[in-house]
């Protein structure tokens, strides 16, 4: 969801993957009727607190926390990133396909529906939540299954509310390592990495992290807001190899 001249923020692919893995309750969504139950809960919360949504840039209400999270997650998805999640993302393939199905359904974007169906053809989908897949495929056919009526009513309410929320939230762009910008960032990091490594070994994590903050690639490689994870997990090696995520 991208509208006009909204403020924007770039997010690395690795960080987007970690965010989705934490944010989306895929075990709940995989349950029988897990999708329709979640849609109903979201729709009911939205109906009560709808007046707060246009003002989410200034005030947020706790009962809509899940809704805010899903809007953020949906905004990260584009065709290329969706294909990556379904085919190549690290971790449990079924979980990522469940997450993908949920976000595609919420998005309502025809281009994502097409990519999702193309990716599905490559896998045995028997273990993915059948409800989510049925809703996606049925929507592509014009919502022909009457039994899905309640789910679509709730889904439409959620999509409408997400469109309103997107007007007052920050635009997010996932930067993939294979993109032109991603390749440029990775190249700059590899060039700087020996300096970072030397600083870490000779002066410690604080000095190395402080220097890293001045570099153009810093935002792309940091794994948390305070950088503790990145500094501790990735810089402690004293051998000559580069990190496996570089």
Image: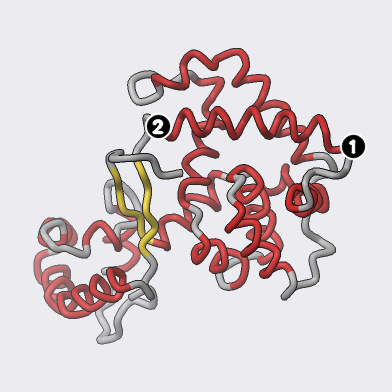
The colour scheme applied to this rendered structure is secondary structure
Position of 15 relative to 162 (above/below): below
Left or right of 135 on screen, residue 213: left
Which of the two residues, 47 or 94, is positioned nearer the viewer here? 47
- Percent coordinates x, y for residue 68 in the rendering: 50, 32
Position of 118 relative to 40 (above/below): below
Label 1 CA crowd tier, 10 Å (few <14, some 14–19, many 20+): few
Which of the two residues, 173 or 226, is positioned nearer the viewer here? 173
The residue under the point 52% across, 62% down is 79
Q: For residue 151, what is the image quadrant?
A: top right
- Percent coordinates x, y for residue 188 in the rendering: 19, 74
The residue under the point 55% across, 61% down is 82
The residue under the point 62% across, 20% down is 45
Looking at the image, the residue that sits furthest to the front is 142
Left or right of 186 on screen, residue 157: right
Q: Which residue is mark 2?
A: 167
Dot 2 or dot 1: first in sequence order is 1
Q: For residue 143, what is the image quadrant?
A: top right
The numbered dot on residue 72 is: none
Q: Secondary structure at mark 1?
A: helix
The residue under the point 15% across, 75% down is 192
Q: For residue 70, what is the image quadrant?
A: top right
Determine whether label 2 and label 1 are within 8 Å by CB: no
The CA distance from mark 2 to mark 1 is 33 Å
Q: Which residue is mark 1?
A: 147
Which of the two residues, 211 or 165, is positioned nearer the viewer here? 165
Position of 207 relative to 240 (above/below): above
Left or right of 94 on screen, residue 9: left
């Amino acid at each position: 969801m991208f509208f006009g001249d909204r403020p924007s923020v770039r997010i690395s692919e690795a960080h987007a993957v970690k965010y989705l893995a934490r944010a989306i309750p895929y075990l709940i969504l995989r349950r029988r009727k897990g999708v329709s139950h979640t849609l109903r809960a979201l729709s009911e919360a939205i109906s009560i607190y709808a007046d707060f949504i246009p003002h989410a840039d200034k005030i947020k209400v706790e009962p809509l926390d899940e809704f805010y999270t899903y809007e953020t997650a949906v905004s990260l998805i584009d065709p290329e990133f969706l294909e990556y999640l379904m085919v190549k993302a690290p971790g449990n393939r079924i979980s990522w396909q469940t997450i993908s199905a949920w976000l595609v359904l919420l998005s309502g974007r025809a281009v994502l529906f097409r990519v999702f169906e193309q990716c599905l053809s490559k896998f045995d989908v028997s273990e993915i939540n059948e409800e989510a897949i049925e809703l996606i495929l049925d929507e592509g056919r014009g919502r022909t299954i009457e039994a899905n009526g309640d789910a679509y009513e709730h889904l439409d309410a959620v999509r409408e509310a997400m469109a309103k929320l997107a007007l007052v939230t920050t635009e997010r762009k996932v930067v993939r390592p294979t993109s032109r910008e991603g390749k440029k960032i990775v190249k700059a990091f590899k060039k700087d990495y020996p300096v970072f490594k030397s600083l870490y070994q000779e002066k410690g994590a604080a000095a190395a992290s402080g220097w890293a903050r001045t570099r153009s690639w810093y935002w792309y490689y940091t794994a948390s807001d305070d950088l503790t994870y990145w500094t501790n997990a990735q810089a402690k090696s004293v051998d000559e190899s580069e990190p496996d995520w570089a």
